[in-house]
Image (spheres, rainbow, N blue to C red):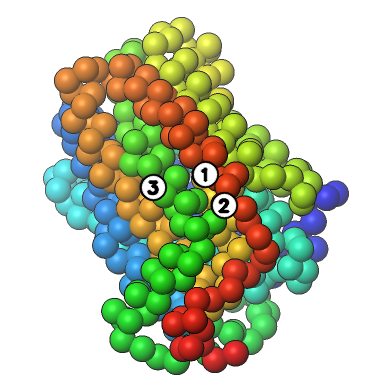
Amino acid sequence: MNTFRAFKSRNYSLFFTGQTISQIGTWMQGTGVSWLVYTMTHSTFMLGLAIFANMFPRFLFSLLGGIVADRCNRYKILLITQITSMIQAVLLSVLTLSNNYTVWELLMLSAVLGSINAFDSPARQPLVHDMINDEADLSNAVALNSSMVNFARIVGPALSGIVLQRFGAGICFVLNAFSFIAVIVSLLLMRLPVYHNQSLVKKKISAELSEGLSYLKHAPELSIILLVISLVSLLVLPYETLMPVFAKVIFNGNAATFGYIRSFIGMGAICGAFFLASIKPETDLRKVLSVNTVILGIGLMSFSHISYFPLAMAFAVLIGFGAMTQTTICLTILQVYTDVNMRGRVMSYFMMAFTGMAPLGSLLIGLISSHIGAPNAVFCQGVIAIIIALTFSKSLRRNELKKKNIELPEEVDNIVIK
């Protein structure tokens, strides 16, 4: 089928399988940490701080991660980051199962994982290029990656809710540690081509960062995408910070309720992923980006003030659909239209925009919700999403994606060996 054409590539099929298992474990761990922090503190601010601890290190180190991804063997970087992530999960498991831990220890280990991910994502995203036999299948592979993440987003929180209720958070973390075995094995089974990202003349880190900024300056069709994802990540996507409040207070539920909310959001996200995987190559992604950002806003506004759980879950699906497609379209455009020697750095700027703004937004939404309440805070996020979509729709149309592999500005081109 056209929707699954990227699976023709053996390396990508291996990667997809291993990552699916690992991502399920990751979502189980993330759900477990959020629930543990909230049940220990009953504070929306501490929930925001937990997200901040995990994501802010990505903001701090993602540019360095992008430089490393452009300089070094991305395959080896990915192996190292997956192994160290497994070690982090083991440490979290031991700490939790000992029943002798504090919130600050949980936050510290979350920060360790965030630091690892700052080097993982800039290497992993461009590596997909090397896994695909036919470059025409790249956008399909990016969409399928998102479907995989969001399938895990359905299964992981649902499993986590059950495990949290019956066995406790420590078992969630143990299962996540074991899940990394799958992705490590899949990487070891791959046969990848010779890497081209080691062809750059080595420069000082500050010079390479400057070159990346110069490249984006001369590519407004990419920089506008980064601006959109920055604003959405800061002001809209941190709605997830407040989901434990909806589960426990608005819906009078428990850990299983929290898992169900995240799973329904994930269900919408996986529908969005298959939607993107199925659209025709000539589809105007900029128009889809604007429309789906509006869908995200409508979903948040509707979800925010509904206390009837089944109906709220219908709008949770809408939220997941809008959020996933909005983010994946931005990632697809950056992946496809960035020069091969700049992909690591552009992906690091994406990580700064996506995961760097989110922790700041989590702190902000946690603080605001403590004054106006979680429902009103989420409603405001929906309004902001619609404003962003309407504000940037003309700019997105004006900055057309002119051709694949945007020409490098002269000052950058001079330091790249062709």
Which callout, 3 or 2, points to the residue nearer the camera?
Answer: 2
- Can residue 262 be seen in this snapshot? no
Tag 3 near tag 2, CB within 8 Å: no
Picture residue at 43% right of the left edge, 10% below the top: 306
Three-letter amino acid code at disc 1? Answer: Ser
Where residue 272 sits in the image (x, y, percent)? 63, 37
- 91 to 379, vertically: above or below: below
Crowd tier of the residue under label 1, counting other residues whose Cα lies within 10 Å: few below 14, some 14–19, many 20 or above:
some
Instruction: Give the quadrant of residue 6.
Output: bottom right
Q: CA distance from mark 3 to mark 2?
A: 18 Å
Q: Quadrant of residue 32?
A: top left
Q: Residue at image x 46%, y 27%? A: 386
The residue identified by callout 3 is 230
In what quadrant of the picture does the C terminus appear? Answer: bottom right
Question: Which residue type does callout 2 highlight?
Answer: Asn
The mark found on residue 196 in the picture is none
Image coordinates for residue 280, horizontal then vertical, percent: 78, 46
* Structural distance between the alpha carbons of marks 2 and 1: 6 Å
Q: Tell me the crowding category of disc 3: few under 14, some 14 to 19, or many 20 or more residues within 10 angstroms, Cα based.
A: many
Asked if the residue under mark 1 is in contact with the one under mark 2, i.e. CB atoms within 8 Å, the reply is yes
Q: Which residue is mark 1?
A: 395
**Which amino acid type is shown beneath numbered disc 3?**
Ser
Q: Quadrant of residue 59?
A: bottom left
